Image (cartoon, rainbow, N blue to C red):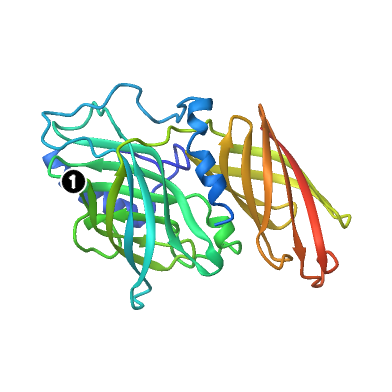
Amino acid sequence: MPNEWPFLGKGLAFPKQWRGIQDRLQKETKIKKKWLPAVLAALVCGSALGQTAPREPLAPVVRGGGALPDPSGVYTGSVMLSVNGSPAVAQIWRIDLLAHSCPECLPGQYFLSGTNFSGSTFDGGLVERGGVYGSVNPNGEAFGLNFFAVNCPLINPSGDVGSAPYSGSTWGGSFGETVGVPLVIKNGSMTGRISGRDCFGRVLSADVSLQRQSASVPPACDSIAGTYSASFSNSCGARGGGTITIKQASHFFGAYLPGIGAALEGVVTGPTSASIRINDSCGTAIYDGTLSINGNTITGTYSGVSTGAQGCCPAGPVNGTFTATRN
């Protein structure tokens, strides 16, 4: 069983909620739109970069007796989403799954990791994006299946999540915060309950009905995750610097930019390129930009329109750049 957040690294303690989930998991395992072109472009980046997700075993999938066909694939479909107990609203989600060999698994189980999801949609078109990590039993029931958002800094720049340290994480079936119908992945469909906390720390529950659109999954991209020393500047003379920490799950990544008091999300589109979006309180809308990757150095450029508020650039067009080197 994993002993750390899969996207934060070893040595970090699980929150109380996850420890309870772990207990249930141990019992369960007894069975043992502007941005759309960039997202589409990212689907082919793995072929150029190679499959390099560090936690993914390289051995082929072990089918464990063939009780359940390989569930790998791209799943999309409708979701009825409720936040803090509000009436459910319909959304469209996408979840990619990739099965791997699992020496610790019992016959017929699958281990899933190294892929992405696009989940909850917020006002302004912002979407929680991140990675997937967990397992599936021979009967198709998911256990310990965690969906972790990496772009919470962009969606919730304030970082205020109340008393929910695991915000941005949801789980499938009986492991989530709002227990519901088990999440079952079988015969080309994914149905059941996903629940936990969104990027604002609010209770989220989603009853999903997704269908597999393709059995092939976009391969992973090279990772730019890590801690960087960065410098920032913009077109109205503001300059600064600081440390940024990038979290990444396959194609998607996110970070807070302290030098300009903003946050970004990105999607890798090629061996040396990515598209980025920056949420700056001085902007009339989300800024769009690009990121170039050169070894351990990344350079971002972006543009948008300033509100002209106090402490911001004068009202009108603004552009900026930042350069960061991995420590």
Q: Is residue 263 left or right of residue 260?
A: left
Q: Decide: is 313 above or below 301.
A: below
- Residue 284: name its quadrant: bottom right
Residue drawn at x 65%, y 45% is 244
Residue shown at the point (22%, 42%) measured from the top left: 136
- Most distant residue in the bottom direction: 87
Name which residue lies at 37% across and 36% down.
Answer: 217
Q: Position of residue 171 (x, y in %)?
A: 31, 54
The percent coordinates of residue 184 (x first, y second) are: 20, 51
Is 317 above or below relative to 66? Answer: below
Which residue lies under the disc numbered 1? Answer: 186
Q: Secondary structure at mark 1?
A: strand
The x and y percentages for residue 205 are: 32, 65
Can the viewer see residue 253? no
**Residue 20: x %, y % from top left:** 27, 54
Relative horizontal placement of residue 15, taking residue 270 as reference (left or right)? left
Q: In screen coordinates, is 97 left or right of 47? A: left
Relative to 97, is 54 above or below?
Answer: above
**Front-lying residue, 270 or 250:** 270
